[in-house]
Image (cartoon, coloured by chain):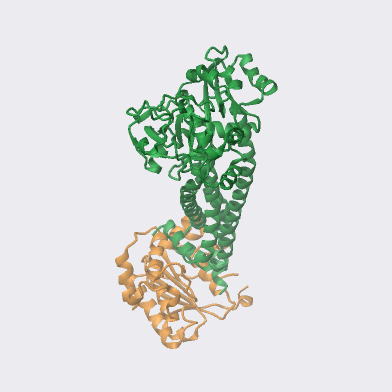
Chain colours: A orange, B green
């Protein structure tokens, strides 16, 4: 698989759009340090994360990259608040309960602080996932099909939230999707060609 | 929040499989710990009450039974031996014997055995009197600490001994014992015994002590005790000699060798009085009895047909081969038998050891199964937890963190299982102690902790670790990208 060079500036919002099977998710995993590229590099700020070894990469990812997936996954035994605290703990950040609560408030989840995650609606779950991606003030926010499982209203809400908070934190936002509803919302766009064409 | 906290919450989120693993762990650990407790306390008490006796001489029968009944006061006596036969071993000038403790067994009070013996018996355990002074006169009793405590008896109190060791129906009501002293707790079998002089036992077992109930009942009582109670021979024998229709306590006429009974006063109401007041007429009770081994030896000529149950013999030199041969000589040349306590208790532990080993093996199997259950529970949960493990990696958890997370889950179950298991076993021991006390004449307790239990903790941790090892490795290998791209 080959991907075109891509250069996103600080605080820019990008949309990477393509049909399923064109390697969107693979690209996002490469950007997030979940996969290692066979060749080439992934640089965030000045760090080439492709060259970081195991635990260092994990640590870097925890601190500087926030990722939102198509389907939100949580640690089932922890409640909403604890799932966010977990993100702080695993990233090696200070466990700051006030920060967690104020972020949840901003995302309209203040009333669900001690709820079990699987008791929330889909839209609420996705908002918790966004909160989790934001909690450590990352430099980069990656979102993999964040809206494809949501209805129009929730879709708008989620994109607005992502854009608003990325802006607030000065983070670079990269959304990977095949969701055509997002097409008109972003200035910076990359269209991925199907794999057969790009080889 | 830390790894331990997350592990703990993970365990609580699947209560059923946790409970199963926990129950198995508790069973295994509890059983092993209980075995350790029983074994330790039994061995301790047996060794403590052993008292350094070199040889026990008694009536022919099972040597183990002789040891158990004469040293540990557990089993029934093998029977009685006559003073005539015992005489050489009671001789203070015996060249090989340092000390001999004669004893007469067969009666009890409220489940506690009465031992007719001499003061030398107390030296065996270096027993000290807590209050009062040691038994001397007939029907003076010295109580073990536990007897006094459990029965609430105090100095001056009286009680009637019963024939046999159970809840006997036959009481020697005419000859109540008076408590004259209580021993300090010694942690030995003495704590559970009632001691008196030898002659008290003879007096209360003389024929007049047949109860006044119908003969039939008495016969039944006798047959009840026949299997173990040496004193029955005494009774049976003397029944033939005496006319029980004259069963009127008239000892002057029933001349059966108890010279002190010739003017026996049957006004039992007076027995309550202090014995010194009645020394001249309250016979049998205030009469100085036989309470040292020397006294006994000197009294043999007038008491040749009297019997005792056994003798505890201490050699002058344990390495003297003549002493070592003495036991065989007794077995070969007399109607008595000798038994070596060290050898017999070793044999007993070996016999009990088989059952103990079987139980221990069973407990080990349960522990292994509990480990297996922890393994299965963790391993099968990995599948449904693969997303959350991957997401934890995304959030910055390293492989080793996920490894530790699962290991800690195994260890938490092991530690919980260990703690509850230890609690259960000690509680069970405390409950068992009540039953074992009756059976073994010792106090047992669940309130002691052994260093072996620390080793058990180590073992539990190892089982928990091994059980969690493969799931933990599996968890640490979680492929984030692959897991999160399959929705």
Q: Position of residue B322 (x, y in %)?
A: 63, 14
Q: Is residue B128 visible?
A: yes
Q: Nearer the viewer, residue B426 or B183?
A: B183
How many labels, in total? 0
Residue depicted at 51% across the width and 30% down the height: B253
Q: Nearer the viewer, residue B308 or B387?
A: B308
Q: Position of residue B45 (x, y in %)?
A: 50, 35
Relative vertical location of residue B76 with respect to residue A187 in this rendering, above or below: above
Relative vertical location of residue A184 with respect to residue B277 in this rendering, above or below: below
**Residue most toward the bottom?**
A152
Relative vertical location of residue B457 with respect to residue A90 in this rendering, above or below: above
Q: Position of residue B173 (x, y in %)?
A: 45, 40
Q: Quadrant of residue B311?
A: top right
Relative vertical location of residue B473 with respect to residue A177 in this rendering, above or below: above
Residue depicted at 63% across the width and 43% down the height: B357
**Residue most toward the right?**
B332
Describe residue A132's horizontal placement relative to residue B385 as left or right: left
Q: Point out the image quarter for the N terminus of chain B.
A: bottom left
Describe residue B123's horizontal placement relative to residue A1 as left or right: left
Q: Point out the image quarter for the C terminus of chain B.
A: bottom right
Describe residue B176's horizontal placement relative to residue B385 as left or right: left
Q: Position of residue A118 (x, y in %)?
A: 45, 75
Q: Nearer the viewer, residue B177 or A51?
A: B177
Q: Nearer the viewer, residue A172 or B303?
A: B303
Q: Is residue B48 visible?
A: no
């Amino acid at each position: 698989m080959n991907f075109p060079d891509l250069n996103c500036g600080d605080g820019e919002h990008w949309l990477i759009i393509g049909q399923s099977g064109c390697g969107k998710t693979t690209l996002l995993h490469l950007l997030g340090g979940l996969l290692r590229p066979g060749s080439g590099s992934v640089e965030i700020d000045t760090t080439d994360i492709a060259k970081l070894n195991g635990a260092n990469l994990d640590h870097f990812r925890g601190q500087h990259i926030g990722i939102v997936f198509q389907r939100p996954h949580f640690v089932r035994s922890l409640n909403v608040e604890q799932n966010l605290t977990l993100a702080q703990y695993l990233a090696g950040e200070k466990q700051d309960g006030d920060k967690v609560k104020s972020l949840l408030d901003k995302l309209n989840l203040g009333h669900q602080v001690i709820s079990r995650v699987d008791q929330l609606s889909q839209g609420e779950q996705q908002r918790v996932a966004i909160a989790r991606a934001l909690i450590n003030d990352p430099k980069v926010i990656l979102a993999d099909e964040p809206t494809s499982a949501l209805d129009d209203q929730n879709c708008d809400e989620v994109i607005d939230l992502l854009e608003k908070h990325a802006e607030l934190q000065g983070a670079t936002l990269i959304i990977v999707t095949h969701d055509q509803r997002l097409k008109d919302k972003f200035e910076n766009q990359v269209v991925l060609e199907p794999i057969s064409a790009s080889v | 929040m830390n790894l331990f906290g997350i592990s703990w919450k993970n365990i609580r989120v699947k209560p059923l499989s946790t409970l199963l693993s926990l129950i198995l762990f508790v069973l295994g650990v509890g059983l092993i710990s209980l075995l350790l407790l029983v074994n330790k306390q039994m061995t301790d008490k047996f060794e403590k009450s052993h008292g350094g006796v070199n040889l026990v001489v008694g009536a022919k029968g099972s040597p183990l039974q002789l040891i158990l009944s004469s040293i540990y006061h557990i089993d029934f006596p093998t029977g009685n031996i006559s003073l005539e036969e015992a005489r050489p071993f009671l001789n203070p000038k015996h060249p090989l014997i340092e000390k001999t403790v004669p004893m007469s067994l067969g009666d009890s009070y409220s489940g506690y055995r009465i031992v007719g013996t001499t003061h030398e018996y107390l030296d065996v355990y270096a027993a000290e009197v807590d209050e009062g002074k040691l038994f001397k006169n007939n029907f003076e009793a010295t109580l073990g600490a536990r007897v006094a405590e459990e029965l609430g008896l105090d100095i001056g109190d009286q009680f009637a001994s019963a024939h046999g060791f159970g809840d006997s129906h036959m009481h020697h009501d005419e000859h109540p014992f008076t408590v004259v002293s209580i021993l300090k707790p010694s942690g030995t079998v003495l704590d559970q015994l009632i001691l008196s002089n030898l002659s008290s036992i003879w007096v209360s077992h003389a024929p007049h002590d047949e109860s006044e109930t119908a003969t039939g009942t008495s016969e039944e009582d006798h047959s009840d005790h026949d299997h173990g109670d040496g004193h029955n021979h005494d009774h049976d024998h003397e029944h033939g000699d005496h006319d029980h229709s004259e069963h009127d306590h008239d000892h002057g006429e029933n001349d059966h060798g108890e010279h002190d009974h010739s003017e026996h006063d049957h006004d039992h109401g007076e027995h309550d009085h202090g014995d010194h007041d009645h020394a001249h007429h309250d016979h049998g009770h205030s009469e100085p009895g036989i309470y040292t081994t020397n006294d006994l030896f000197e009294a043999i000529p007038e008491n040749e047909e009297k019997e005792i149950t056994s003798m505890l013999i201490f050699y002058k030199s344990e390495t003297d081969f003549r002493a070592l041969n003495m036991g065989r000589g007794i077995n070969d040349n007399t109607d008595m038998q000798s038994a070596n306590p060290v050898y017999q208790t070793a044999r007993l532990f070996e016999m009990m050891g088989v059952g103990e080993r079987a139980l221990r093996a069973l407990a080990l199997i349960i522990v292994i199964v509990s480990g297996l259950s922890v393994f299965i529970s963790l391993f099968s949960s990995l599948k449904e937890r693969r997303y959350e493990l991957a997401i934890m990696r995304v959030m910055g958890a390293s492989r080793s963190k996920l490894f530790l997370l699962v290991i800690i889950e195994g260890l938490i179950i092991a530690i919980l299982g260990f703690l509850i298991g230890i609690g259960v076993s000690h509680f069970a021991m405390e409950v068992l102690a009540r039953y074992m006390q009756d059976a073994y004449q010792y106090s047992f307790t669940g309130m002691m902790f052994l260093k072996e239990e620390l080793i058990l903790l180590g073992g539990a941790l190892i089982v928990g670790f091994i059980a969690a090892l493969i799931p933990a490795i599996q968890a640490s290998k979680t492929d984030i990208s692959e897991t999160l791209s399959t929705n």
